[in-house]
Image (cartoon, rainbow, N blue to C red):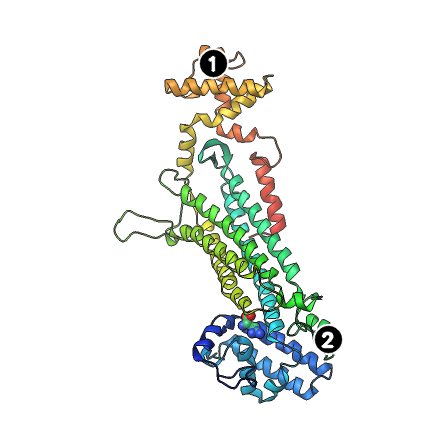
Amino acid sequence: MAKLWGTRFSKGLDPSVLKFTSSIHFDKKLAIYDIDGSMAHAAMLGKKGIIPKKDAKRLVSGLKALRKGFQKGTVKLDESKHEDIHSAVTEMLAKKIGKVAKERLHTARSRNDQVGLDMKMYCKDKIDGLVDCVTYLQKSLLNFAGKNINVIIPAYTHLQHAQCILMSHQIIAYVEMLERDKERLLGCKKRTDEMPLGSCALRGTSLNIDREAVARALGFSRITQNSIDAISDRDFIMELLAALMIMGIHLSRFAEDMILWSTKEFSFVEIDDSLATGSSMMPNKKNPDVLELIRGLSGNIYANLSSVTVMMKGLPLSYNRDLQLDKVPLFSSVETLQEVLPLTAKLVKTLKVNKANIKKKIGEDEFLFATDIAEFLVKKGYSYRKAHDITGRIIKYCIKGNKKISDIPQKRLKSFSDVLNVKVIKGIVDPERSVASVKSKGGTNPTMVKSAIKRWRRKLGNA
Ligand code: ARG
């Protein structure tokens, strides 16, 4: 195996140590970024006259060809031959263009700043892709909300019936959550947008490099300002993992809502057959395994964050090999969400709403209108405490007598309050009127929910 070091050693590396320290089997995912970074570096070295111009040219065109090969899949990486992606790129380049690759490319560069660069390029790139996936899911949720704008469901606190809301109102809650996730990702991208190359092993170099030129060539808006920080910093990875962890939790909560809503007990929605699974024993089963895995994977995503933060804690500045362990958890969270986000969108797009059943469920529980009664009483001049108390007594009366609120006779109603009568109660115990009565901004009133959908569509563009 060819390594980028070794001359000062008088013994070859123990094969078990080589296997233990190698990272090629996972950092190969950085190949394209490593090549692009190397190209910008080589071009700069040539321009500054640090290496002969003709060597720089050969390096750049060789790297271009290597990049094409990687993209087309014609270049095959032999993992047994390389220690990490950085040595692999140099080695494979040497095969193409000869020894100039090994002799010149690594001038004024260390794998320490190189790996920092590769990781930042990876993060910036993946953030863009993830943001697009989130927008796509938001649009699917908005479409679902728009299609089912008039569906009224019981809303829950403590998983107990609370009040009537528009189903679309709850769906848009997820659009809001996902927007915050996107903002976190983009904020993280802004802080990742600092080019570390040129920090070299840890203190910079006496060679007259142009770091700004490399930053410009690679699409970074600025360079890192302290070489020790640049080598040691993995904040951008922890931050991205934290943002993904919160997103994972949002998707898990959405999955949980849909799992509940698709149970026989709720039966608000039905998952499309193409996205559900069966049982090997029970022929009747239709299971929400996709949603359960989305919920379960949020655990892995959370573990990936703790894995890196615990690894970082207590590391002395600057580079330590522990830092190599940031990759597998990062790639895992990114790849999991790259898969989960479009799948969630697919699920939303094909989700059917059991309107008749929902209507029946609402009709079975007039206690959903208790707050409506209390607020009616407030409008008639009662304090909220008093109104709460009167409505509580009405509920108690109904529970004891196993009655519906709309079954209470006129005389009995009057005994709770003389502003109550059968006609008033009939008016209140009406889901459409109930949601339409909400006046506070951000509430479930259909007019407000419709304009929320419009506002989101304007912001996100049509699906
Ligand atoms: N594979 C290493 C990592 O991912 C690359 C940097 C190695 N540098 C070193 N001095 N050992 O962190």
- In the figure, residue 297 lies in which quadrant? bottom left
Residue under the point 35% across and 49% down: 287
Return the x and y of residue 428 as percentages of the image width and height. 51, 23
User: For the residue labelled by badge 2, is the local secondary structure a helix, a strand or a loop?
Assistant: loop
Q: Name the residue that disc number 1 marks.
A: 413
- Sequence-first tag of 2 and 1: 2
- In the figure, residue 4 lies in which quadrant? bottom right
The crowd level at tag 1 (other Cα within 10 Å; few <14, some 14-19, many 20+) is some
Return the x and y of residue 45 as percentages of the image width and height. 69, 81
Return the x and y of residue 349 as percentages of the image width and height. 47, 50
Looking at the image, residue 270 sits to the left or right of residue 458; the answer is left
Q: Are marks 2 and 1 in contact (CB under 8 Å)?
A: no
Q: Type of residue at label 1? A: Leu
Q: Which mark is residue 445?
A: none
Q: Name the residue that disc number 2 marks.
A: 210
Q: How many marks overall?
A: 2
Residue 269: in sight, yes or no? no
Return the x and y of residue 365 as percentages of the image width and height. 42, 28
- In the figure, residue 383 lies in which quadrant? top right
Report the image quarter containing ligand 1. Answer: bottom right
Looking at the image, residue 183 sits to the left or right of residue 53; the answer is left
Using the image as rendered, state which of residue 336 and residue 317 is in the foreground. Answer: 317
Q: Type of residue at label 2? A: Asp
Residue under the point 41% across and 53% down: 293
**Label 2 beta carbon within 8 A of ligand 1:** no
Distance, label 2 to label 1, CA atoms, is 84 Å
Looking at the image, residue 229 sits to the left or right of residue 327; the answer is right
Looking at the image, residue 294 sits to the left or right of residue 286; the answer is right
Callout in the foreground (2, 1) = 2
User: For the residue labelled by badge 1, is the local secondary structure a helix, a strand or a loop?
Assistant: helix
The crowd level at tag 2 (other Cα within 10 Å; few <14, some 14-19, many 20+) is some
